[in-house]
Amino acid sequence: MRLSQIARSIKASPTLALNEKAAILREKREPVIHLGGGEPKSRAPMDAILSSVNMLNSGEIRYAPADGTPDLKKAIIRYTEEYYHRKVSPLNIIASSGAKQAIMVALQAILNPQEEVVFPAPYWVSYPDMAKLVGAIPVPALPEDGSFYPTLKDIEQRVGSYTRAIIINSPNNPTGAMYSEKFIAEIVEFCEKRDIYLIMDDIYHRLVFDGRKPISAFDYTKESVENSKIIVINGVSKQYAMTGFRIGWAVGNKKVIEAMSNIQGHQTSGPSVLLQKAAVGAINGIQSGVESLRVTLENNRNIMLSLLRSFNGVEVNSPDGTFYCFADFSAYEKDSNELSKLLIDKVMVLTVPGKEFGLDGYLRLSYCGAIKEITEGIERMKWALDTNSPNELFIGDRKLVRDWS
């Protein structure tokens, strides 16, 4: 069967595949622990639920405008003014079916085939394939100093005559690194000088730790929103624990937002009005849930760090935000795919191989679950990898014997 060149170049999302595998194992009542997940376990805000229930009860669930409902745009305008210190109009906003779609239509709006998009590595798994979907070329930029904090030089060295966009994800998935104000200021200035689009993937921007505050790229531009090539991406999935609602948005100049809206109108039309109403409830409602989630995640991070640092040979930096640790397990196994497979096969712990994020030898571990799962999951991993551990392990009534080295 003949498939297109793009279809042949795209592989399944590894994180979504892991979620599916976890669901299948749980359905079989297997004692799996999912440390590869990317969704908080807290409930969606009650304001979001009530807003959607009220609309559902009305029975008036109709098509949405391709770029989002007026109510949601109004809420995003207020949000943008509060957290990004910019007054924008409805024409500067598009609501999409998740932040992922907002990024995708942004790339479709600004990139031609064979043009390049640069992003720091490690990177979110979807960036390279999203670039390929528009026929563009993904260009990862791994920091030369071996850290998770790129410098302007790291980015500049990858920028060429075909570069049309740079994506910055801070706090970063998978590392949890939050880039400094100095770096954001430098990258904004650099993009303006080179006339390059800057896509700020800010989906984790309020989930930061140790007294840090969200950073707005708009604070460092000399341009108005209309003259700026900054596109800010955000959504309700992470900070409001509303992953299944699939509502994200983009803020940018009117010309690019119009192009994105035209593209989205032919792809999916606007997101469900019911789910947009829920997003309005979350954004306009009581915000204490965001802080409660942030505090919980910070505490979970500290527990996971303590457990990981008990391993001999595991190197891990303290994440500044998000809900991921990106730990170096290369002392045990340099091939992260093999290591991840061993852990699910032997002790039923799901992790995401670092190779999927552009850095082998690492595993991405999520601490957004229950403390019990975090603790037991890391303990199982240690038993599987550390030859100094006892030879036997009980998972419920099941006795495991280490028969590998």
Image (cartoon, grey):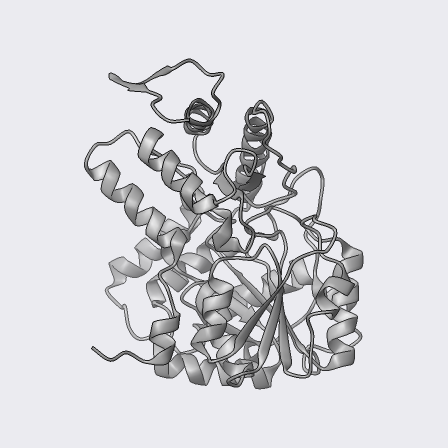
For the point 71% across and 83% down, the residue is 227
Q: Can you give x and y, in whole percent of width and height, for residue 384 in the image?
A: 42, 26
Q: Is residue 64 visible?
A: no
Q: Residue 187 at what x, y percent from top left?
A: 74, 67
Residue at figure coordinates x 20%, y 39% from the top left: 27
Quarter of the image containing the N terminus? bottom left
Quadrant, the C terminus: top left
In the displayed structure, does residue 123 sit left or right of residue 279? right
Q: Say which quarter of the image contains residue 215.
A: bottom right
Q: Position of residue 329 (x, y in %)?
A: 54, 37
Question: Which residue appears at 24% of the width and 80% of the height?
Answer: 2
Q: Percent position (x, y) of residue 71?
A: 46, 68
Taking 177 as reference, is 155 above or below it?
below
Between 254 and 123, the residue placed more toward the observer is 123
Does 223 sit above or below residue 119? below
Q: Is residue 65 left or right of residue 320?
A: left
Count of numbered tags: 0
- The answer to which of 271 and 361 lies nearer the viewer is 361
Could you tell me if residue 80 is visible in this image? yes
Left or right of 401 on screen, residue 294: right
